[in-house]
Amino acid sequence: MHRQLIKQVLLTLGFVLTVQAMAWSQYEGAAALFMCNPSEVVSADDFESETVADRWGFRAYYAVENGVLKRTAYQRGETARSFLKDVVYRDVVIRFDFRFDGATELRLMTGGSGGYNTVTQIFPSYFQVNTAKRKSEFNPSFQGECAFEFKQGVWYTMTIEFNGDEVVAHVNKECFVIGSHPIIDSERTYLAFQVTGGAASFDNFSMSKSKPKSSWESERGKLLAVQSKRSPAINRNAKEEYDLIYLNLKDRLKRTDSKYRQLVARHTELSEKLKQDFPSANQTQKELGKRIASTRIDLKKTEPLLKEMELALNRSRRAIKDYVHSKYPNLDDLPKQKYYWEYERRLGEMVEDVSLIELTERSNELEARLHAAFPAAYQDVDALVKKRNLAQAELRSNDEYRTRKKEIADANRAVEVYLFEQEPRLAELSGPRQAIIKANR
């Protein structure tokens, strides 16, 4: 209720809701924060203006309605993000209101230096904080979780404090997650809301620079003690418990244990050499996708016909868009934060429109011709994966390939043995975990 009440009071008093006033009007003061004191506002949005799309990335997955950023019904099953544009930040306090409107998971994702660094995941019954993988430098980690019943259709507020290599996320003084990791201590240039499994709403976003409180050194230990004594937020089976321990152990050893790094490096070296010597059998799906994209870029440089056919396809898609606009002229006047979703909604209402069907069929025909004319540039990744799997099967009788695969398996087994030595609980869970995997096949 505090979110709506603040807006009503400010409007009643005739105030213009400026960026800085909005950012901290909803705070209960510094006492509401654990680690930091906020100062200069970096970014803030109440999603009331017609210029929200100047600050946030939009497609039909998101729209602004009644001063709220919403995950729309467009492709409801798809995981979708809306990102904050042109932002640079480091030690900050981030705060936002959120509401589950059918979604199964919400995320606040931060990143920089070529990848993500923290992910705050909010589920209907708990929330947790993770750190991400950064190339060969860091493995992902699980920082902690806290049980909390987030009811559908009810507004809540999440606060995330960053300082140095530490993070504290909380919904109140009792429900918090505290964590630390070197990847957190970095400049960030990316922030996004992500929604999975349905609709959700966001409001009153604010980000302000911060400095640690003088009391933080003594408070940190108290919070860690409370968090360490908590029961898990959810019941995990043997596989889930194993995977969580495994995740954090690999992260810790990667950063602190030279022997572990040597064992992993040996496995990586053997795997990369095999990939170089037998590329057709050892490319990942991601690598295959990049190969297709690279082929398309190269062909555009040497094949004028490809450019001509792509231009014709784009014109056909533009014709579809123009036709929809001709039926719903009000689309021309909508701001971007409303346009994309409204366009898709109107398009869905016209599925039986004869002229639209003809335009769509024409566009599909042009696309099919383009793909047929340049198959290497528009290959299906799944088909390439099947081809790769066939290549692997054919190499099973190749003595050199089999010997190399065994070397890789032995190197991987050495890593696993070392992990089990460092954490005996993994060995205890290994059997039950395998049983669960087999039962779910």
Image (cartoon, rainbow, N blue to C red):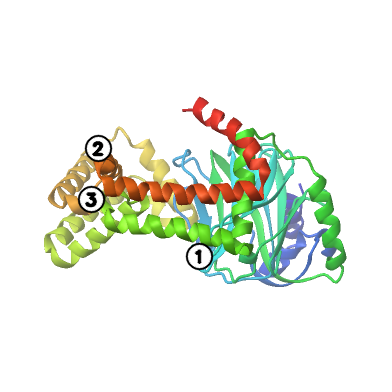
- Left or right position of 250 against 363: right
The circle on residue 54 is 1
> Could you say whether the residue bearing mark 1 is in a helix, strand or loop?
helix
Q: Is residue 9 visible?
A: yes
Circle 3: residue type: Tyr
> Residue 41's quadrant in the figure?
bottom right
Query: Where is mark 3, residue-wise?
Result: 378
Mark 2 or mark 3, earlier in chain: 2
- Left or right position of 38 against 98: right
Circle 1: residue type: Asp
How packed mark 2 is, by other alpha carbons closer than 10 Å (few <14, some 14-19, many 20 or more), is some
Q: Position of residue 432 (x, y in %)?
A: 60, 30
Q: Position of residue 362 (x, y in %)?
A: 18, 43
CA gap between label 2 and label 1 equals 34 Å
User: Which residue: 62% across, 58% down?
Assistant: 253
> Could you say whether the residue bearing mark 3 is in a helix, strand or loop?
helix
CA gap between label 3 and label 1 equals 33 Å
Q: Position of residue 403 (x, y in %)?
A: 33, 48
How packed mark 1 is, by other alpha carbons closer than 10 Å (few <14, some 14-19, many 20 or more), is some
Taking depth in this image into account, of 289 and 189 the one nearest to the observer is 289
Q: Position of residue 137 (x, y in %)?
A: 53, 65
Circle 2: residue type: Ile
Name the front one of labels 2 and 3: 3
Taking depth in this image into account, of 349 and 288 the one nearest to the observer is 288
The circle on residue 357 is 2
User: Which residue: 27% across, 61% down?
Assistant: 294
